[in-house]
Image (cartoon, rainbow, N blue to C red):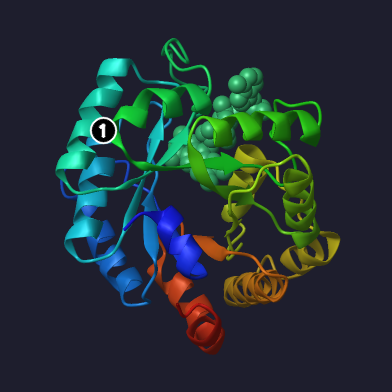
Amino acid sequence: MRIDKLLKQKRTLSFEVFPPKKDGNAADGLFETVKRLKALSPDFISVTYGASGSNARDAAEISGFIKSIGTEPLAHLTGGPSSPDDIDRVATKLVSLGVENVLALRGDKPKDEDIEYCKYFKHASELESYIKKYGFCLGAACYPEGHSECETLYADLANLKKKEETGASFFITQIFYDNSYYYRLVGEARRMGINSPIIPGIMPITSTKNLPAVKSMCGSTIPLELRNMIEVYSGAPEVLREIGINYAVYQIIDLIAKGAPGVHIYTMNRADTAEAIYGRLENVFGRLFRA
Ligand code: FAD
């Protein structure tokens, strides 16, 4: 089912997974993870696409697997490393697997790889225009604290409007740990005439290993109270995990109370983390996410 249609009917619960780096049987573990995530009745599961385009095959196959077990996949696609031929190849495969939803992205040039970047698709909006012919329901990314390359949030929002005009019918946010950034983004987006649903993206910090990813990939602000707890309990992994899960639960309840159209959880391929959040929120998901 198309995600834009789903969002008109209900509040969505969704998860993100990424293809494992290694070839061979590495995908098997992820298939098990996906089966466990399915048991939590998500409305869709998204699959990331390597910034260098290297795991394109796996990404399409994983999306196909999600579809085959009766859950809706959202396949990410990055234009930065891709040629029109690459995109046609993956898009054709996604169509043949019955995938209806694509998150159109630019991607970031990997620092350690000497590859040509953004030769054909400079921005996500150009990829959207190109893949329109396949009839996917398109989504795109947005940034509660503004994208790192934009001087102001407003310049970034002007570009977000372009992504809506070129076909995005919903947005998923970069991770954030202070909900006020999300509320500001939604308020300003509406003021600028961007009307598509904006789904908040939540990634629990369950280990100090998550911190470099938060800092370098996303640059998201970690509020002082959360930072303090992480520092105090950095030597106690089981406490840190509780803190991360409880903080995510707190964020989600606040977001739902203020009318967010859904929640997207970046699972980092950890089914147990998604299960722990779901376990604490079962009543909320059961009551407020029903059609
Ligand atoms: P764009 O929309 O092209 O924006 C990039 C920058 O250019 C921004 O500063 C924007 O304001 C500006 N801009 C946009 N359009 C225009 C325009 N028309 N003219 C001038 N400037 C413009 N990366 C991956 O490699 N694989 C993934 O699977 C992946 N999934 C993601 C999922 C989500 C929900 C999010 C939030 C990010 C994801 N990323 C992924 C990371 C993403 O690729 C990076 O954040 C990247 O830097 C920007 O991608 P974008 O699609 O937002 O790019």
Residue 169 versus residue 78: which sits nearer the camera?
169
Image quarter of residue 128: top left
The residue positioned 26% from the left and 69% from the top of the image is 35
The residue indicated by pointer 1 is 91
Tell whether 213 sits left or right of 189.
left
Residue 32 versus residue 256: which sits nearer the camera?
256
Dot 1 falls on a residue whose secondary structure is helix
Q: Is residue 243 above or below residue 25?
A: below
Say if residue 23 shows up in the picture. no
At label 1, the amino acid type is Ala
Residue 277 versus residue 164: which sits nearer the camera?
164
Give the mark count: 1
Q: Is residue 75 above or below residue 51?
A: below
The quarter of the rendering in which ligand 1 is drawn is top right
The residue positioned 25% from the left and 48% from the top of the image is 99
* Image quadrant where one finds the N terminus: bottom left
Residue 4, image x, y percentages: 45, 54
Q: Is residue 122 above or below residue 197?
A: above
The residue positioned 50% from the left and 28% from the top of the image is 124
Residue 159, image x, y percentages: 66, 28
